[in-house]
Structures are given as C-alpha cells and as structure tokens.
Image: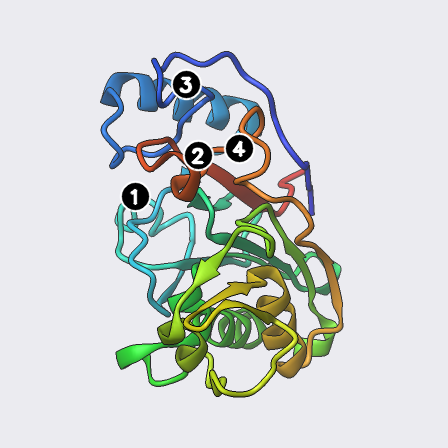
Amino acid sequence: MTARESLHFATASQAPWDGFNLGNHVGDELADVLKHRGELAAALQAQPLWLQQVHGQCVVRLTHSAKDALAETQADGVFTTEPGLVCAVMVADCLPILLAAPEGRGVAALHAGWRGLAGAGDLNGLGIADTGVAALCEATSSDPSDLQAWLGPCIGPTVFQVGRDVLIGFGVDPNQNHPRFIRQLPDRWLADLAGLATDRLQSLGINRIEGGHLCTVAEPSRFFSFRRDRVTGRQAACIWLDGA
C-alpha cells in the first residue's frame, strides 16, 4: 500500500474555489476541475474513481474492468483489491475514512458526514462505516481487527455545532451527558465527528485507528470548509494498492 498525507499543486480555479478544487458540483469551472483531476491522476499514476456522494451507506467495488462504468456512481464508499486503482472521497468538513486490509489485500475510502456515519433516517442505523468495513472484510477474507483505519481532516469538535436531530441520529438521549456531545445552549451541542467515527469503528472491531486531529474549519490556508465558507471547493482523500 502506498500512502501520502498530501500532494501540492498549483490551482487553476478562481476564488472562492482556489486551492486545487476537485469537486465538479460546487460551481467551479468544469475545465479547471478537470485540469486538477488530471494533474492528480498523473501524480498518482492512476485515475481516481470520483463518486457522486449522497450521505448514504452504499459502497462500490472498484475493478479495472468496471472502473469506467462506475464513474459518478451514487455511493459514499469505494473499495478495491486490485493494484493500480485509486479509491477516493471528496470532503469539505465531512470525515474521510481510509481503510487498509493486511498484506496489501485491499483498501477502501469512505465519506462520512454525520448522517452517513450514524446511519440516520431511512438508513436504519446502518452507516457507511458499517457497510464499508463489512465489504472490505468480505472481499479480503479479513476480520475487522485486521484492518487499519486513518481519519482525515474534518470539522473539529470546537466548531461543529449541532441540534437534537444529530444526537437522536446517533441514538443519544439529548437529556443525558455524552462525551462526544458538549452542550452549549439548551438545544445546541458541539459534536466530535472524528470521535464518533472512532467509537463506531471500535464497535465494529477495528483497534488500529490514526488521524482525525485536523480541523477543516480552523485552517483556511490548508482546507476547504463548507461550514466556514458555504461556497467552496472540495479536497480529496485517496488510497490505493501500489501496482509495483
């Protein structure tokens, strides 16, 4: 497995999307987005699969034979067991979760907003971490305890203000204290998205979890943030199996 925290490129986009925007659905010029995506693919020496993310629980399997057909599929997770294919998710406050099975057997990238992580609403409690871990384990004949997880930059616990619906989505009683939700006002709490993801991954049996300490809102020079800027770009987290 090859892993890199970040790659740095010159931006073609104009404000407010300047900063190497990779999202083609946020109002930026399509030509500039495609230029950025092309430069990223050249640097990785493989074309990432770009999903149409919908805050759901669906994960898709990326293969060399199916990579073209899967482009812009509605899903919030992607996994592969084949070298030379890049699993990618775009974020601008939501949490990217990258998973790796042992011995280079497979990798996955998951897009976790609070709804998708909690499995809220019609997801019936089954979130993207649940489906993503299960899919990668089945494809690689692994147990969850075999996997490693990395949590990328997301909105941090000092700025992610939420209402009762988020607590209820995670099955938390708003009238009770909870370590991942700090009450600010009678009906407003500060939520720890990375902490909630850690809890969910640990409940699934994953113990090797790193990252989750960078706040997208607090670092405008490094990260796009929808909560901070509203109109903004998207960064990506990528993981792949080295074809060498």
Please identify, in this view, whether the residue under mark 1 or under mark 4 is nearer the observer: 4
Q: Is residue 55 above or below residue 41?
A: below
Of marks 4 and 2, which one's residue comes earlier in the chain? 2
- Nearest to N terminus: mark 1 or mark 2: 2
Name the residue beneath numbered marker 4: 223
Report the residue at 60% width, 60% height from top: 194
Residue that badge 2 annotates? 47
Residue type, mark 4 in image: Phe
Residue 18: which numbered mark, if any?
A: 3
Residue at (41% x, 44% y) in the render: 227
Q: Secondary structure at mark 1?
A: loop
**3D distance between C-alphas at marks 4 and 2:** 22 Å
* Amino acid on which the number 3 mark rests in the picture: Asp
Q: Residue at horizontal 50%, vertical 43%? A: 86
Residue 215: give x, y in percent of width and height: 60, 44
Please say whether residue 34 is visible from this viewpoint. yes
234 or 178: nearer the viewer = 178
